[in-house]
Amino acid sequence: MIQKQKGCNDIYGREAKIWKYVESVIDAAMEKYNYNYIRTPIFESTELFHRGIGESTDIVSKETYDFVDRGGRNITLRPEGTAGVVRSYIENKMYGDPNQPVKVYYNGTMYRYERPQSGRDRELTQFGMEVLGSDDPITDAEVISLAVNIYKMLGLKEIKVNINSLGDKESRDNYRKALVEYFRPHINDFCDDCKTRLEKNPLRILDCKVDCDKDVMKNAPKTIDYLNDASLKRFESVKEYLDIMQIKYEVNPSIVRGLDYYNHTVFEVEAKVEGFGANNVLGGGGRYNGLCDQLDGPETACIGFASGVGRIVKALELENVKLPIVDDVDLFLMYVNEDEKKYAIYLAQELRMAGFIVETEYTGRGLKGQFKQADRLNAKYIAVLNSEDLDNNEIRIKNNQTKEEELISLDVLIYYLDEKLNTGCEDEYCDCDDEDCHCGDDCSCEGDCHCEHDHHECNCK
Ligand code: HAM
C-alpha cells in the first residue's frame, strides 16, 4: 500500500470541517481589517529564499525542499510566505500603487524538511498577512492585534502574546557583538548547532531548544538593553498603541525569531493550554524593513505575521472550543421505486437551489437502511417519497427527532421547511428564542439576544 510521506497529513471528515471553518474566520477577519488576498506560487527560485530568509537560518540551511527542474533551474518549494509576497510586491511594482501601504494576506501550503513531530510537519498550512510600505508603529500594533483577534474570534482563550524589539541595524549589530562575546567562553558546553551559530547567527542560540535551560542562556544579554534611542522610542509607541487596543502582551527578551530578515518589533503568540507539547507557538512575525531592498526592490518598511493552521486546530481541540460547524442535513429524501427516485432527484435539486442541505439515497439501500443512513447524517427532517402521495401533489415530512409526521402539499414545501428550520436566532450559541433575532444579519431583538460571539456580528444593542 502506498502511504503518505512523513510529516504530511490527510485532512478529511470532521477535521476538514474544522479547517474550513478556521479558514472562513481568517477570511472574515482579514476583510474587516481590509487586507487583500494574495496567491503566490508554491515554488520559487531557490535564490529568493537564500537571499531573503538567510543562508545561515535553520530553514534555508537544512529544511528546504530543493530540486532542479527539467529546464535546469534551481527551484525551492516555499518554506514560508513572506519572501514570495515581497518578490511579488517588487515584480508587480506594487510600491507604485498610490494606495499605500499594501496590505495582503495568504493561506497556503509551505514545505519544511524537519524532523516530523507533533505540531511540526513537513507539509504545513500557514496563513499570514504582510503590510508593505509603512514604518509607522500603528502597523506593528495592527498586525499584532489582528493576529490576536483571529485567535479570539475562533474562541481560543488560553493564549499569550510575547513581544520584543531587535531595534534598527545599529542596535541589532551592537547586540550581536555583545552576544558573541558573552557566549564565546561557554560555547564548548553547547550543542553542535549552537557552536556553528556563534559566528554565523548568534541570535539563534537564544532560540535553541537543546540548551534553553542552561543558566548561561538565562543570563544572556537582552536586546532591549542594546536598543538606541530611536529604536526604544519606536518600541514604546508600539506598546502604547497595543494598550489603546487593549491587547494584552508581555515583553519577552528571548523572542528573537528564527529568520534573518527581522528588525524592530518581533512577536510570537503561544498556546498556553495544557497538553500542547513543545511546539506551542501558534504564530509569529515581526518587522522586516530591509528585505525588499535586499531582494533588489526599493527600500520598503514592512511588517507581517504567519500562523500554522494545524496548530490552531490542535489548540481548538485542546481548549474544547465549541465551533459552529454544520454537522447535520436539513432533509433526507427516501425512495423505493424508480419513479420516486426520479422525483427525489428533481426535488433535491429544487430544494438545494432554495438553500436547504438535502441528502438522498445513493447505494440502493432498502427503506430500513435509508432510515439508518438518515440518522447517521443527523437529518433533521426525512421525507419518504411515495408515488401515491406524489400523484396527489403531496409529501410526508417527518421530524426526525420528535418523529411527528405531517402530510403537506408539495406547493408549500419550501415555505414549510423554511419555517421549521429557520426559527429563532440563527446563532448556534445564542440563547435567544426570539424568532426575530437573526444574529449575523438584521438582528432586531433589541436586547433579548444573548449572543456572546462577536464574530457573528450580532447587531443587538
Ligand atoms: P515562522 O515562525 O517560521 O514564521 O512560522 C510561523 C508559524 O508557522 C509558526 O509559529 C507555526 O505555527 C507554523 N509553522 C512553522 N513551521 C511549522 C511546521 N514545520 N509544522 C507546523 N507548523 C509550522 C514565518 O514563517 C514568517 N514568514 C512569519 C512572518 C510573516 N514574518 C513576517 N511576516
Image: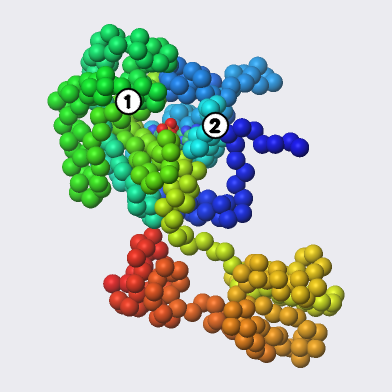
Reading the chain from its start, which is encountered first: label 1 or label 2? 2
The answer to whether 70 appears left or right of 126 in the picture is: right
The answer to whether 235 appears left or right of 37 in the picture is: left
Q: Nearer the viewer, residue 170 or 336?
A: 336
Residue that appears at 40% across and 16% down: 191
> Which numbered circle lies on residue 116?
2
Callout 1 touching callout 2 (CB < 8 Å): no
Crowd class of label 2 (few under 14; some 14 to 19; many from 20; radius 10 Å): some
Q: Is residue 288 above or below residue 431?
A: above
How far apart marks 1 and 2 lie (CA) works out to 23 Å
Can residue 164 be seen here?
Answer: yes
Camera-side mark, 1 or 2: 1
- The percent position of residue 380, horizontal first and vertical second, equals 60, 75
Residue sticking out furthest to the right? 338
Residue type, numbered disc 2 = Pro
Residue type, numbered disc 1 = Asp
Secondary structure of the residue carrying tag 2 is: loop
Residue that appears at 62% across and 86% down: 404
- The percent position of residue 383, horizontal first and vertical second, equals 69, 80
Residue that appears at 64% across and 19% down: 68
> Which numbered circle lies on residue 213?
1
Q: Nearer the viewer, residue 80 or 206?
A: 206
Q: Is residue 200 above or below residue 109?
A: above
The answer to whether 111 appears left or right of 150 in the picture is: right
